[in-house]
């Protein structure tokens, strides 16, 4: 059974004090949740403080990006060992905003995954099509390319330590969620691709999260889909009340 996984990607939001204050509230609100893996991905500047704050709770820590080299003259970058050191268990890799604004490619994603796995981190790999691609009927081609180019070559054992996030770009921050059916068909397709890269058994174990305008009102309908194992939440993860309602979707 795949344990549901709900992650909040804060993107470039929250100062240190806002971050700490937020996590204290969430911690209290989700203290009784045991059957969902809960992750927060604050900006780098808040990682250490949040890491201390969540100690002993069921909340896990993720970074929003990573560089593939272990150390050296790479001004502005953060390495996997630094993330591990600060208490991260997960790292988001290949978010569409990184691809769109910062030159992330499938090739750089693949290098970041490799380096992160080597440090024992669990990568959350983002894939998803743009609106023009969906409208041109190229969704499956696009997603297949991303999955293969980012993930081919990893062993079944490595693949088991990853999570894939399907985030259709047109649904991010737009309030326009993919319908549960639209999301499910791509999730099922991604699982099939993972099976071809590794094997059926592994593909059945890898969790696939949906991201794109997830909120407390649409989470339940997404989560009942057989291949949707969780959510990667942007905007609605910034308020403790809405994030905890998403985490507690079963009680809604
Ligand atoms: P929104 O939930 O704000 O649409 O963002 C989704 C996202 O990009 C999560 O990584």
Image: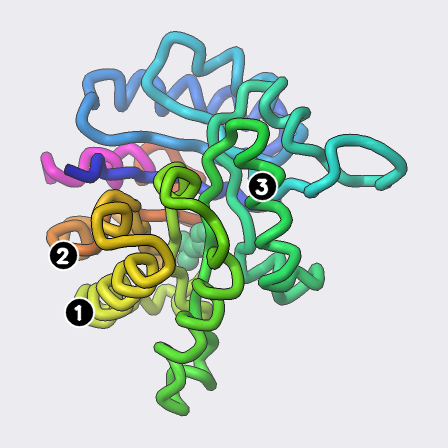
In-front residue for pair 92/173: 92
**Disc 2 and disc 1: Cα gap in Å?**
8 Å
Count how many numbered circles sit on residues in the image.
3
Q: In the drawing, what numbered circle is on residue 73?
A: none
In-front residue for pair 119/178: 119
Q: Residue furthest top?
A: 56
Which one is earlier in the sequence, the residue at label 2 or at label 3?
3
Bin the neighbour count of mark 3 within 10 Å (Cα to Cα): few under 14, some 14-19, many 20 and up: few
Which one is earlier in the sequence, the residue at label 1 or at label 3?
3
Residue tagged 2: 225
Q: What residue appears at the point 23 percent right and 71 percent down from the top-left corner? A: 182
Q: Is residue 102 left or right of residue 145?
A: right
Label 1: state its secondary structure. Answer: helix
**Disc 1 and disc 3: Cα gap in Å?**
31 Å
Residue tagged 3: 13
Do residues under tags 2 and 1 come within 8 Å of each other at their CB atoms?
A: yes
Residue 10, position in %: x, y?
A: 51, 41
């Amino acid at each position: 059974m795949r344990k549901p996984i709900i992650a909040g990607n804060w993107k470039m939001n929250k100062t240190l004090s806002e971050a700490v204050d937020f996590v204290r509230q969430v911690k209290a609100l989700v203290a009784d949740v045991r059957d969902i893996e809960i992750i927060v991905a604050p900006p780098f500047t808040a990682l250490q403080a949040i890491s201390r704050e969540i100690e002993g709770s069921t909340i896990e820590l993720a970074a929003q990006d990573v560089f593939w080299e272990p150390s050296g003259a790479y001004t502005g970058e953060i390495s996997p060992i630094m993330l591990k050191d600060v208490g991260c268990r997960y790292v988001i890799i290949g978010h569409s905003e990184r691809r769109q604004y910062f030159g992330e490619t499938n090739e750089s994603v693949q290098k970041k995954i490799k380096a992160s796995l080597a440090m024992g981190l669990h990568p959350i790999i983002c894939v998803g099509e743009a609106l023009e691609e969906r409208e041109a009927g190229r969704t499956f081609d696009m997603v297949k390319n991303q999955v293969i180019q980012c993930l081919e070559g990893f062993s079944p054992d490595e693949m088991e330590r990853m999570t894939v996030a399907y985030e259709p770009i047109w649904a991010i921050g737009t309030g326009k969620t993919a319908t549960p059916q639209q999301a499910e068909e791509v999730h099922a397709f991604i699982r099939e691709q993972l099976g071809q890269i590794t094997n059926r058994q592994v593909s059945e174990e890898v969790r696939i999260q949906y991201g794109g305008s997830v909120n407390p009102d649409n989470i339940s309908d997404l989560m009942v889909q057989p291949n949707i194992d969780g959510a990667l939440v942007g905007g609605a993860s910034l308020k403790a009340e809405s994030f905890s309602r998403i985490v507690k979707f079963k009680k809604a």
